[in-house]
Amino acid sequence: MKIVIANDSHFKYAEIICETIAESAKVRGTGIAKRTPEYIQKRLHNGNAIIALDGDKFAGFCYIEVWGHEKFVANSGLIVHPDYRNQGLAKQIKKEIFALSRSKFPNAKIFGITTGLAVMKMNYELGYKPVTFSELTTDPEFWKGCQTCKNFDILTRTEQKMCLCTGMLYDPETKAKETKSEPKEKLNSKAFQRLKSIKESLFLNKKTK
Ligand SMILES: CC(C)(COP(=O)(O)OP(=O)(O)OC[C@H]1O[C@@H](n2cnc3c(N)ncnc32)[C@H](O)[C@@H]1OP(=O)(O)O)[C@@H](O)C(=O)NCCC(=O)NCCS
């Protein structure tokens, strides 16, 4: 498996990346910001993406988006092809895209919004903390991305204060102040699953377990 910084030679994978992201969202029944192959190609061209290839076969992907004049960057669109899941590939891609973000944008806060427990776990281990949406970028272009998500009405109803996604943030300044001797914590998965089901019952009229 090769995990590399993507470039123009990977343009041919843009289509399968978009298809795999859309297909997986359908299977999970969750909302997702839809991306076109042209949008993905821009990230490949800028060297703002990581791609995993098994020989010539597409295995996984993630890209960097820059918001608020480089004050914030997001690691978005994480996808592992179903044939390569549960082998630690997402974790490796996340590590690489995080390292790329830190080296290209050392002063930026790194954030993401997600409903996925796997992503929350990985972010947490990289040093992200769960935060309210008010601590994330106010760049309207970022929030416009949510318009293609099927839960967009919730974000509108709450005046962008909350949605089914949880916001997570890595703040390099706060991180620098923390001591290195702190024990590495694991995400409390149960608490997050509970929070998600409470939000679903509030916003989607689903019954909580
Ligand atoms: C989520 C996804 C990227 C995980 O890829 P993967 O290569 O199978 O993940 P890894 O094997 O590296 O696992 C990383 C961690 O997530 C956990 N994990 C993986 N899939 C999970 C799931 N469906 N639910 C909960 N945790 C999960 C693993 O147990 C592991 O945690 P651990 O280190 O505590 O054991 C992949 O399933 C995928 O592409 N899904 C569809 C797209 C998606 O959901 N993207 C996230 C957008 S929010």
Image (spheres, rainbow, N blue to C red):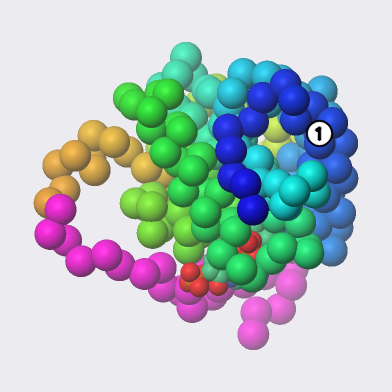
Q: Is the residue marked 1 within 8 Å of ligand 1, measured from its CB?
A: no
Which quadrant holds residue 109? top left
Q: Is residue 198 magenta?
A: yes
The kind of residue on which mark 1 rests is Ala
Instruction: State whether residue 183 is above or below residue 130.
Output: below
Q: Is residue 153 left or right of residue 91?
A: right
Q: Position of residue 78 (x, y in %)?
A: 64, 47
Of 84 and 122, which appears nearest the observer? 84
- Point 80% across, 49% down: residue: 57
Of 24 and 60, which appears nearest the observer? 60
- Point 53% across, 35% down: residue: 74
Q: Is residue 168 left or right of residue 60?
A: left
Q: Quadrant of the C terminus?
A: bottom right
Q: Is residue 28 left or right of residue 183?
A: right
Q: Is residue 136 left or right of residue 176?
A: right
Q: Is residue 105 magenta?
A: no
**Ligand 1 is found in which quarter of the picture?**
bottom right
- Point 67% across, 24% down: residue: 7
Q: Position of residue 54 (x, y in %)?
A: 72, 52
The residue that disc 1 covers is 14
Instruction: State whether residue 196 is above or below residue 36.
Output: below
Q: Residues within 10 Å of mark 1 (few under 14, many from 20)?
A: many
Residue farthest along the front direction in this orientation: 55
Can residue 157 be seen here? The reply is no
Part of the protein shown in magenta: 180-209
Q: How many marks?
A: 1
Q: Position of residue 128 (x, y in %)?
A: 38, 50
Instruction: State whether residue 68 is above or below residue 98.
Output: above
